[in-house]
Each structure stands twice: as C-alpha cells, then as structure tokens.
C-alpha cells in the first residue's frame, strides 16, 4: 500500500516537473521571439526614418512652378486636370530634358492657334519643372493613364 502510494507520488511529481519545464521553455521562446521582433521593429523604424527622401529641392521647387503657372488647367497628371494639352505623367520617358527645357524657354505656337504661344518659363523654372516631371515619372502607375490618340491632332 505504502509502496503504491510512493510510486504514485513519484510518478505525479515527474509528470508535473516535465509539464513545468515544457511550460518554461514555451514561455522563454515566447519572450525571446517578442523581444527579437520588437528589436527588429525599432531597428527598421530607425533605419527608414534616416533614409534620404527621394525628392530633391529642385523637384519640390518644380512642383511650385507647376502650381504657379497653373499647368493643370490644360494638362493632366495621373489623369487629373485639363484636357487641352496631353497628359504629362510620363512625358520625361518620351522627351529628353534638354528638349523639354528648350520647349519651355522658347515655347512654340500652340496648335491649332496661329499666334498664341505655349506658356513660357525662364531657364531656372524650366529646369526645376523638368526635375519635378522626372520625379512624377518614377511613380509606378501601372500604365495609368491610358494614352489615347487624339483624332485629327496632326492633320
Ligand atoms: C492654355 C493651356 C496650356 C497651359 C496653361 C499649359 N499648356 Fe502645355 N501644352 C498645351 C497644348 C495645347 C500643348 C500641345 C501643343 C501642340 O501640340 O502644338 C502643350 C504641350 C506641352 C508639352 C509638350 C508635350 C509633348 O507631347 O511634347 C509640354 C511638356 C507641356 N505642354 C508642359 C506644360 C507645362 C509644364 C505647363 C505649365 C508651365 C503647361 N504646359 C501649361 C496647353 C497648355
């Protein structure tokens, strides 16, 4: 009788200890993973806060030129704006910077007009603006907006 009792107690004791150890192991893993992921979170936050902003001062100045001259009244960016001129979201993929700067500094007559020239910019504004348009072109738009051929534009 006593022997049975001792065996039972020993068995129970071993069982409880095994459970406790397993529990500790789980708790330790849990805490370790938590601390590690919190550390990772802090590291990523600190690193990304220090990354240089991809927007240069000229780009920001170019956006102000865009606003000051109300280019949006005739042109769209990302499909929003006026439809007199073309969409300019990806214009820098089509035209090179020197062509664009020349276009703004010595603007041609706007078709279908005979005398009205395209709005003109000075050289500094033109360069800033091209930086802005180059930045806009780097924003992924999945091909948006769709480019439609204008009927009779060149006729
Ligand atoms: C009054 C309306 C109007 C305003 C304002 C205007 N544009 Fe235009 N823009 C046009 C039209 C119309 C054309 C097309 C001219 C042509 O095809 O002969 C054009 C052409 C262009 C082109 C050449 C596009 C190409 O396909 O090569 C660029 C670049 C451009 N505009 C940029 C601008 C910028 C930048 C501004 C602001 C500083 C601006 N435009 C303001 C009407 C406008």
Image (tube, rainbow, N blue to C red):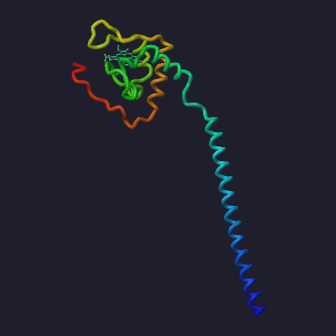
Residue 134: x percent and y percent?
Answer: 46, 26
Percent across and percent down for residue 132 are 48, 23
144 on left or right of 49: left
Q: Quarter of the picture for ligand 1?
A: top left
Q: Is residue 21 above or below residue 36?
A: below
- Which corner quadrant holds the N terminus? bottom right
Residue at 24% x, 20% y: name it. 154
In this picture, is 4 found above or below 60?
below
- In this orientation, which residue lies closer to the viewer: 84 or 107? 84
Q: Residue at x 39, y 37 (%)?
A: 142
Residue 64 drawn above or below residue 48: above
Residue 4, percent across and down?
A: 74, 91
Point 75% across, 88% down: residue: 5
Which quarter of the figure has residue 84?
Answer: top left
- Which residue appears farthest toward the top when viewing the image? 115
Residue at 44% across / 16% down in the picture?
101
Q: Nearer the viewer, residue 64 or 11?
A: 11
Q: From the viewer's side, name the closer residue of 10 and 41.
A: 10
Quarter the C terminus occupies? top left
Residue extending farthest bottom: 1
């Amino acid at each position: 009788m006593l022997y049975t009792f001792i065996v039972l107690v020993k068995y129970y004791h071993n069982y409880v200890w095994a459970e406790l150890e397993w529990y500790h192991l789980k708790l330790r893993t849990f805490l370790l993973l938590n601390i590690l992921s919190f550390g990772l979170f802090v590291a990523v936050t600190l690193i990304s806060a220090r990354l240089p902003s991809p927007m240069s001062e000229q780009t920001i100045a170019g956006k102000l030129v865009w606003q000051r001259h109300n280019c949006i009244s005739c042109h769209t960016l990302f499909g929003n704006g006026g439809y007199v001129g073309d969409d300019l979201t990806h214009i820098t993929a089509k035209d090179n910077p020197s062509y664009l700067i020349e276009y703004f500094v010595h603007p041609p007559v706007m078709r279908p007009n005979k005398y009205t020239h395209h709005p003109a910019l000075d050289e500094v504004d033109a360069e800033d603006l091209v930086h802005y348009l180059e930045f806009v072109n780097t924003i992924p738009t999945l091909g948006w907006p769709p480019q439609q051929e204008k009927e009779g534009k060149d006729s």
